[in-house]
Image (cartoon, coloured by chain):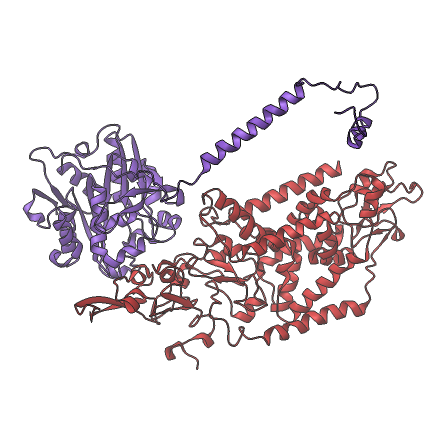
């Protein structure tokens, strides 16, 4: 403030607003408290804007993606002399499952106490159990019970349905049966998928249901069905159901994409449901005329062998089914299921 | 005391309404009658009955409002109407602080007669066969706003945990209209209810006969006008109470410092008036304008007899004429549709069908085992189907067809690009499948021979559900698309000779 020259009208106006009774601050050259505060604020703003600009700056070039997770190898060690594959026939699906797993050495061979397990039935379609488009709910429930009894720490059950998930999970009877048996049922909403490395011949990455990323053990419980494009949908094809996103693109090379996914998952155990099989209009079905009662369960850890056996139930020659041949070439197993140590039980 | 009783009713009915809207999803609906409040709506009953010459059985519930209104007056607006509650609650937006200013805000205005003209236009439209009441009816509007704007937005923000991701065709328009109506409270309290609401107008007409009314004891009144400062309906309690405008909020009784107002049976005739002050010529003019508009709207192309191919109606929909006589555009079918494929039409169903439901298969298909849209339709525009009726059993009982699928061979991967695909065949839900393939050997670009599965549609089995179009891997416009052709609700749509009528 200068004491020379004409008075500053702003200063006058400001001092005119000072209420009566309060003392206007004495003019001073030294920095008062308010001045110090202002310097502090300005300095903070300046430093803050520099920090913000450097923090947000675009480094140019491609954005670095963080490393994607890769699924574990879920396979269990095979004890010496253990049975490779069990085929059980009988009128009670749950009993068939129990006997098949016992023949392989019991669930304890595959699931240890405290391990986290995900069970993957086929819940792809808005169909009832009689229509044989989804895995039989009695089979699902029995598998859940066995896994729970083996002491699993966590039992998830999930599938990425093709029709509306709510309706598929309900109408297949699987959600209710699995919950009653003690599984945590995960319906595939948008938040349930994680991007992972597939590192296959065709597929590099994919969005996979999270239990498959987190689980220690994976149990595959497919149903045996005819399929228009691939010939059949059984164990190997069931891995389409771990994927979200644009999975309908896979059909452009269905056999190789099936193998890419099966090689990614490497399941612990496969229990194949052939209680009822769908012979035509698969994989959706709908008409009971296309369904055949087989009362059969096949279990093992060689998905190629199981699919070769399943193909015979559908009246197909395994050597004519593209993904079985590709699975053999990729080293996932052998179509010569008779060459394995196989046990057949039941009537 | 009245005020708290009324607020309790308002909260209970709004909560009940919200509950019914929220449970209208495939997951929660069970057998709840989610349309209960819409079935209460006398305007829905009157207009659909006028248009279709029959009263859908569920609309008998409207008597629950009609008869008490004849006795008690327009209590619905202040005690039950969900939109009325919202407007009541938002009335503070423009409310003045000083009571004399509020008296001015709540004074009767000539513009309050507009709602009666709106009603007359709506009745005229209905008489000529076009129910447009859903555009302005408060319950249908609130339904639509919640179902296709508010709840989908909240659900999407909650990562689709409620109904999955939901998107509605030009839902923004519905948002603007819904919140725009609420924002009219910035002009003056309950602007929509006083000026525009056709249901309020209808209930106002019924209130002309009401036996219970607000009555003022002129000997006690000192003209302080506190009553007018609180009046919801701008019914002029400070002067002569207008029975047609009174919403029976009972605020006036509580605000009178002398206890000079009461709500009672058969008060003295002179203490209230039922005059609306619209000459007969205006009533008639508005009604005739509504009726005349209908043939003009139908002279436009894109409606019967040459409808837009995208006008794919939900399964169980009545023939188009009958459909337009009943559909309220409330959006309940769109809300409950498990795939989200049912969408509010813009131009696809003509002017009359604006915001009526159509299936947009690229967004979602018609789930073969689902009949929920017919279950929630309050007026029977979409009939209740059993699953057996919908799926049918060929050849004896054909299924309900809502259209047919057609290949776009330039976009289809096998046809246009010699690339293996047939996802459409895989997902086709009919049995036998309407989409089938033939294996053909073709010569590829490099001269090698290649076998490909080429897909075809069998019209006899295709129901137009659109699963193929939804799932087609060709991004944006699919390689197989559904149009309404061959829908089973009218023989005029049939394509094949075996479909019957020529």
Q: Nearer the viewer, residue B289 or B251?
A: B289
Using the rendered view, name the quadrant where residue B47 is placed: bottom right
Q: Is B288 on the left-hand or right-hand side of B413?
A: right
Q: Residue furthest right?
A: B219
Q: Which quarter shows the N terminus of chain B?
A: top right
Residue B342 in view here:
yes
- Which shade of the palette goes to chain A? purple
Residue drawn 58% across and 55% down? B174
Residue B260, given in percent of the width and then of the height, sits at 87, 40
Q: Nearer the viewer, residue B131 or A54?
A: A54
Using the rendered view, name the quadrant where residue B121 is placed: bottom right
Q: Residue furthest bottom?
A: B502
Q: Nearer the viewer, residue B290 or B310?
A: B310
Residue A104, given in percent of the width and then of the height, sits at 13, 38
Q: Nearer the viewer, residue A78 or B328?
A: A78
Residue A57, given in percent of the width and then of the height, sits at 44, 38
Residue B44, given in percent of the width and then of the height, sits at 63, 59
Q: Is A193 on the left-hand or right-hand side of B92?
A: left
Q: Which quarter shows the C terminus of chain B?
A: bottom left
Residue drawn 25% across and 62% down? B420
For residue B108, above or below residue B395: above
Residue drawn 36% across and 47% down? A169
Residue B262 in view here:
no
- Which shade of the palette goes to chain B? red
């Amino acid at each position: 403030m200068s004491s020379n020259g004409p008075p500053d009208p702003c200063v006058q106006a400001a001092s005119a607003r000072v209420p009566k009774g309060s003392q206007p601050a004495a003019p001073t050259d030294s920095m008062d408290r308010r001045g110090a505060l202002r310097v502090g604020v300005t300095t903070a703003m300046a430093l803050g804007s520099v920090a913000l600009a450097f923090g947000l700056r675009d480094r140019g070039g491609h954005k670095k993606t963080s490393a994607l997770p890769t699924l574990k190898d879920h396979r269990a060690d095979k004890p010496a002399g253990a049975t490779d594959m069990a085929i059980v026939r009988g009128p009670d699906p749950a009993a068939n499952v129990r006997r098949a797993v016992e023949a392989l050495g019991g669930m304890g061979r595959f699931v240890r106490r405290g391990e986290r397990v995900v069970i993957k039935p086929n819940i792809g379609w808005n169909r009832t159990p009689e229509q044989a488009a989804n895995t039989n709910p009695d089979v699902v429930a029995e598998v859940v019970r066995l896994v729970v009894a083996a002491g699993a720490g966590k039992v998830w059950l999930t599938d990425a349905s093709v029709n509306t998930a709510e309706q598929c999970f309900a109408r297949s009877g699987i959600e209710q049966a699995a919950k009653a048996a003690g599984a945590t049922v995960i319906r595939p909403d948008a938040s349930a998928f994680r991007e992972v490395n597939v590192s296959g011949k065709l597929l590099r990455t994919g969005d996979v249901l999270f239990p498959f990323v987190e689980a220690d053990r994976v149990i595959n419980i497919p149903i045996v069905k005819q399929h228009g494009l691939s010939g059949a949908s059984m164990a190997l094809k069931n891995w389409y159901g771990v994927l979200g996103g644009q999975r309908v693109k896979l059909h452009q090379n269905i056999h190789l994409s099936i193998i890419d996914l099966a090689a990614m998952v490497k399941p612990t155990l496969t229990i194949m449901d052939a209680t009822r099989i769908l012979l035509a209009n698969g994989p959706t079905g709908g008409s009971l005329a296309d369904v055949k009662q087989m009362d059969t369960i096949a279990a093992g850890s060689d998905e190629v062998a199981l699919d070769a056996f399943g193909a015979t139930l559908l009246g197909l020659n395994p050597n004519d089914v593209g993904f079985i041949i590709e699975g053999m070439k990729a080293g996932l197993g052998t179509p010569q299921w008779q060459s394995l140590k196989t046990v057949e039980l039941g009537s | 005391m009245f005020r708290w009783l009324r607020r309790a009713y308002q909260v209970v009915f709004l909560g009940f309404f919200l509950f019914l809207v929220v449970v209208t999803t495939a997951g929660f609906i069970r057998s709840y009658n989610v349309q209960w409040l819409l079935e209460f709506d006398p305007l829905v009953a009157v207009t659909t009955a006028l248009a279709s010459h029959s009263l859908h059985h569920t609309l008998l519930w409207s008597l629950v409002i009609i008869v008490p209104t004849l006795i008690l007056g327009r209590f619905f607006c202040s005690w039950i109407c969900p939109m009325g509650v919202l407007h009541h609650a938002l009335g503070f937006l423009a409310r003045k602080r000083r009571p004399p200013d509020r008296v001015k805000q709540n004074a009767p205005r000539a513009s309050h007669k507009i709602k009666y003209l709106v009603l007359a236009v709506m009745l005229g439209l209905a008489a000529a066969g076009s129910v447009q009441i859903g555009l302005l009816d408060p319950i249908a509007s609130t339904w639509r706003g919640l179902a296709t704007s508010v709840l989908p937005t909240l659900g999407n923000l909650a990562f689709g945990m409620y109904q999955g991701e939901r998107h509605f065709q030009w839902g923004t328009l519905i948002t603007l209209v819904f919140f725009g109506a609420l924002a009219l409270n910035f002009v003056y309290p309950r602007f929509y209810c006083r000026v525009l609401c056709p249901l309020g107008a209808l209930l106002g007409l019924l209130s002309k006969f009401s036996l219970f009314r607000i009555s003022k004891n002129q000997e006690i009144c000192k003209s302080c006008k506190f009553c007018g400062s609180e009046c919801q309906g701008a019914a002029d309690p400070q002067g002569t109470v207008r029975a047609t405008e009174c919403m029976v909020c009972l605020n006036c009784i509580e605000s009178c410092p002398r206890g000079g107002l009461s709500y009672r049976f058969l008060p003295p005739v002179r203490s209230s008036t039922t005059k609306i002050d619209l000459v007969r010529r205006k009533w008639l003019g508005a009604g005739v304008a509504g009726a005349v508009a209908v043939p003009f709207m139908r002279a436009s192309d894109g409606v019967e007899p040459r409808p837009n191919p995208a006008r794919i109606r939900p399964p169980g929909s009545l023939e188009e004429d009958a459909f337009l006589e009943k559909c309220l555009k409330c959006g309940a079918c769109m809300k409950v549709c498990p795939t989200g494929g049912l969408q509010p039409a813009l131009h696809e169903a003509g002017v009359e069908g604006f915001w009526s439901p159509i299936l947009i298969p690229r967004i979602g298909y018609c789930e073969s085992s689902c009949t929920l849209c017919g279950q929630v339709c309050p007026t029977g525009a979409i009939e209740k189907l059993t699953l057996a009726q919908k799926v049918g059993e060929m050849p004896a009982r054909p299924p309900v067809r809502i259209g047919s699928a057609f290949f776009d061979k330039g976009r289809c991967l096998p046809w246009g690009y010699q690339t293996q695909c047939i996802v459409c065949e895989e997902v086709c839900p009919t049995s036998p499948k309407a989409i089938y393939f033939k294996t053909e050997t073709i010569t590829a670009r490099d001269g090698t021979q290649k076998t490909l599965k080429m897909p075809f549609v069998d019209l006899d089995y295709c129901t137009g559900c659109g699963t193929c179009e939804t799932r087609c891997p060709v991004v944006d416009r699919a390689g197989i698309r559904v149009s309404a052709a061959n829908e089973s609700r009218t023989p005029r749509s049939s394509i094949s000779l075996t479909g019957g009528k020529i």
